[in-house]
Image (cartoon, rainbow, N blue to C red):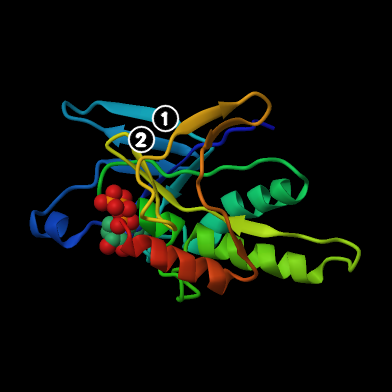
Amino acid sequence: MSSVKVAVRVRPFNSREKDRDAKCVIAMTGNTTTISGGHQQTHNFSYDYSYWSFNKSDAHFVSQQKVYEELGVEMLQHAFEGYNVCIFAYGQTGSGKSYTMMGKPTDPEEMGLIPRLCHDMFSRIQKCDDDLQYSVEVSYMEIYCERVKDLLNPSSENLKVREHPSFGPYVEDLSKLAVRSYEDIYNFMDEGNKAR
Ligand SMILES: Nc1ncnc2c1ncn2[C@@H]1O[C@H](COP(=O)(O)OP(=O)(O)OP(=O)(O)O)[C@@H](O)[C@H]1O
């Protein structure tokens, strides 16, 4: 199994695109994404996952739940097995990164990967044997114009990125705060968002 997986996702048109009668040039079949260019050219790309979330009424529509089942559940499993895991979203502004990662955190249908991961992580921790102890800590930072800002301690601007000989890159002096529930994480994210 590959240690890096790539998923692409198509979001619904926004109102500006609808107003302009935009035409969708992407099609997805299985894990293949097809782009139809001009001059009747098509280009196929194969990813680990191609998520069609363009229209809820389409038969192959992929929900937030499905994205979590395919990407999040396995990640969480690996984390509990002791591996470092990382997920990041990449795409132009308005393409749907926040929706996929966070979604609507209090809506069971539309909550994104992070709230789902956190809920499941804490419910697994609660069910674990009494002789096991877990501690969960969160950090929240922003890298903007090459400057690293600690969103949970906004007074510390422009933190340094350093390389540890065994653990690799890290951000010096980035705060790590202990949390006991998803609500704690949510509150810190809310606080951090205000510092952005
Ligand atoms: N899969 C989806 N289903 C329904 N709505 C979506 C989906 N993806 C994105 N949207 C909607 O599209 C809009 C833009 O998405 P979002 O804010 O997630 O983009 P973004 O990539 O995080 O943008 P930015 O880089 O500007 O922060 C939002 O209103 C969001 O709710």
Residue indicated by mark 1: 45
Q: Which of 128 and 133 is in front in this view?
A: 133
Residue indicated by mark 2: 34
Relative side of 106 to 18, left or right: right
Whether residues under marks 2 and 1 lie with C-beta atoms below 8 angstroms apart, the answer is yes
Residue 64 in view, yes or no? yes
Q: Quadrant of residue 21?
A: bottom left
Relative side of 67 to 193, left or right: right
Q: What element carries label 1?
A: strand
Relative side of 54 to 40, left or right: right
Q: Residue at x 88, y 66 (%)?
A: 129
Amino acid type, residue under disc 1 in the picture? Phe
Mark-to-mark CA distance, 2 and 1: 6 Å
Considering only vertical position in the picture, is 141 above or below 48? below
Q: Which residue is drawn at 46% across and 53% down?
A: 140
Q: Residue at x 89, y 68 (%)?
A: 130
